[in-house]
Amino acid sequence: MLCNEEDEAFEHLFFGCRVSQGVWQKAQNKCAIYRGNYGWGRLGIRWRANSFGFQLRGLVLAVTVYELWQARNDRLFQAKQVSPLGIMQTLTHTVQYVVNYL
């Protein structure tokens, strides 16, 4: 639904479509996250630890998934166009807000 290039499926929405890939790439670059070619099932395993850096990466993971889902819903129900940059801007503001108020 984000890219309108394939039927919506879980793996495609979060990892396969060009929009979500663009968002993941930008998030990886900003936070030094290496997602590799893992699918949903193994995604969180690499980010479990007690240090602030790992907690921040976990926050970015959660916010990224939420923002991709929100962008999908905006496109589906409100016919809004979405871009990786727009999603990333919202994601960045959300993460900054959470970190500032921890």
Image (cartoon, helix red, strand yellow):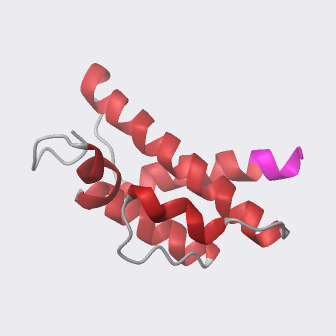
Quick one: quadrant of the N terminus? Answer: top left
Residue 8 rendering spot, x and y as whole percentages: 18, 40
Residue 9 rendering spot, x and y as whole percentages: 21, 43
Instruction: Please name whichever residue, 80 or 19, is drawn nearer the observer in this view of the structure.
Output: 19
Which residue corresponds to the image point at 61% horizontal and 79% vertical from the top-left? Answer: 32
Instruction: Please name whichever residue, 90 or 102, is drawn nearer the observer in this view of the structure.
Output: 102
Which residue corresponds to the image point at 33% horizontal and 36% vertical from the top-left? Answer: 72
Q: Main secondary structure of the magenta part?
A: helix
Residue 70 is covered by the magenta coloring: no
Q: Is 73 positioned to the left or the right of 7 in the image?
A: right
Residue 40 rendering spot, x and y as whole percentages: 40, 56
In the rendered image of this protein, does residue 79 appear above or below residue 52?
A: above
Q: Quadrant of residue 45?
A: bottom right
Residue 14 rendering spot, x and y as whole percentages: 35, 51
Which residue corresponds to the image point at 30% horizontal and 56% vertical from the top-left? Answer: 19
Instruction: Please name whichever residue, 53 or 92, is drawn nearer the observer in this view of the structure.
Output: 53
In the rendered image of this protein, does residue 79 appear above or below residue 1?
A: above
Q: Which residues are magenta?
A: 97-102
Which residue corresponds to the image point at 33% horizontal and 44% vertical from the top-left? Answer: 82
